Image (tube, helix red, strand yellow):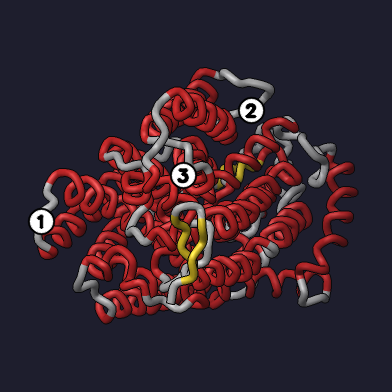
Amino acid sequence: MDAQFLVSLSIILLTFAIYIGIAVYNKARATSDFYVAGRGVPPVFNGMAIGADWMSAASFIGMAGTVMILGYDGLAYIMGWTGGYLLLTFLLAPQLRKFGRYTVPEFIGDRYESHTARIIAAICTIIISFTYSIGQLSGSGVVIGRLFEIDAKIGTMIGVVLIAFYAAFGGMKGITWTQVAQYIILIIAYLIPVIFMSLQITGNPVPWLSYGHIINEMGEIDRQLGISEYFAPFTSSTKWQFLALLFTLMAGTAGLPHVIVRFYTVSTMKAARWSGAWALLFIGLLYLSAPAYAAFSRFILLKNVVNQPIDALPAWTKPWVDTGKLQLADSNGDGILQWKEMIISNDIVVMATPEIANLGMFVIGLVAAGAMAAALSTAGGLMIAISSSFAHDIYYRVLNPKATEENRLAVARISIIAATVLAGLIALNPPGVITQIVAWAFALASGTFFPALVLGVWWKRSNKYGVISGMVVGLIVTLSYIFAAKYGGFTIAGIIDTGAGIFGAASSFLTNIIVSLATAEPSKKVQEEVINLRYPEQMVYKDGDVYLTK
């Protein structure tokens, strides 16, 4: 074993011990602990947990790599994911918290007074969360595979075992406090390399201010090498794809069930708003750093790797070639590595950069631990969303309303383990790169939950027939477009599979509105409840008037 392996392994095992210890200490003993952490999480810590839940393997591992490879076009991911939090914080989170349920399907079932709507919403939650979790487990495989220099598939199964244990054991209460620790680890692990790279390349330790100079320098290198300029817009996609992806990620963010449920873990509407504000701050630290990370990584590759003899490449390239995520080929036979002869997966850029920049073994180990924290934190939240949809919304609310609390917790834990193993098996041979798989989950959320929740909160006329038909049509349209674009080459205005959410959301909104207007309006009680959601908790709307409560 080399020193690098021992350092990385020690750091990762230490963080694993912290996560498991927190989960054991905060074991869920009641259903309210398991689903909403007892509704007692302070806003600042909930903001950290939201940040960890949100900054998945796609953000930590995949986003900087996507921006590095796509350049300007990759910024749609950063703007969409960040902008979506504004929609969620202002449009939905406080109102959903005031309604006071455990899950998104439970809100939809009770708001629209329909078990059918509840079951469809639960199925949509399982599909969305399952798709998202494949990306997270694939990301954990990349990290563990590189650490042990084994196939990423074996690394994925190791991640499955860990997630299944601490998610099933601790529930939402354990996961919340685990995610606080995971956020602290992942943000430190992300910021240290980018700060050191900035200092190393520009002499300025503030990367957010220094990377603009590097981008200008890269433009000149790109022209010399005859490749597309890094900051040129719409070189890898059309303008319409950029806008469609931006919308899909924003609307999907506001409709993701595993993110929305985090706002149920606080005590009041005000706390829900503050949770969103803190989350934006914590998420912004990483998202503002990703473009700098991408620029520095690309610059180092252009300067130190490209145009170098194939047989004299840096030592870091070999272990990454062994993982299958880096391919080098001297296709023109000149013995020199050209930019186009290097195929580097989006998913390894952040993991490989500390080695590329020669930042030292501690930083390499820290980044590995941060990447695992990102993948595990989101995967844990997703498994809780899947479990709650099945165990609470289908098993308890529909199939067996008389189930004891002990039975409900047992079903919830079994469903977590089953979902984790199944998602892990699919992640062994993922259907796309991490950011692409995650974008599909966002497309499904924007085509199903975003219209259902927005209309459910802000349009009292929306009824059960409208929401049922809207979710079904949105799901079918989104899935159909993803499959047609990815496997059939079908596109509209150059919009590919990752932008499918714009078609799903449009069809779902239209269907919900048209069907609701064509059928009977909801009861007066439901309409008053919808209007009541818009007022602070100390105000109640009834019979056309607003009353202050004690």
- Image depth: mark 2 or mark 1 in front: 1
User: Looking at numbered disc 3 in the image, what kind of residue is underneath it?
Assistant: Gly
Q: CA distance from mark 3 to mark 1?
A: 29 Å
**Of residues 462 and 37, which is closer to you in this image?**
462
Question: Which residue is the site of mark 2?
Answer: 495
Q: Residues within 10 Å of mark 3 (few under 14, many from 20)?
A: many
Q: CA distance from mark 2 to mark 1?
A: 47 Å
Q: Are marks 3 and 2 in contact (CB under 8 Å)?
A: no
- Judging by the rendered image, the residue that carries numbered circle 1 is 403
Q: Quadrant of residue 277?
A: bottom right
Residue under the image location 84 percent in, 44 percent down: 222
* Camera-side mark, 3 or 2: 3
- Residue at image location 48% in from the left, 57% down from the top: 533
Q: Residue at x 45, y 75 (%)?
A: 180
Image-quadrant location for residue 11:
bottom left
The mark total stands at 3
Residue 179 in picture, x, y percent from top left: 42, 70
Q: Nearer the viewer, residue 440 or 449?
A: 449
Quadrant including the C terminus: bottom left
Residue 314 in picture, x, y percent from top left: 64, 59
In the image, which disc is placed on residue 456? 3
- SS at badge 2: loop
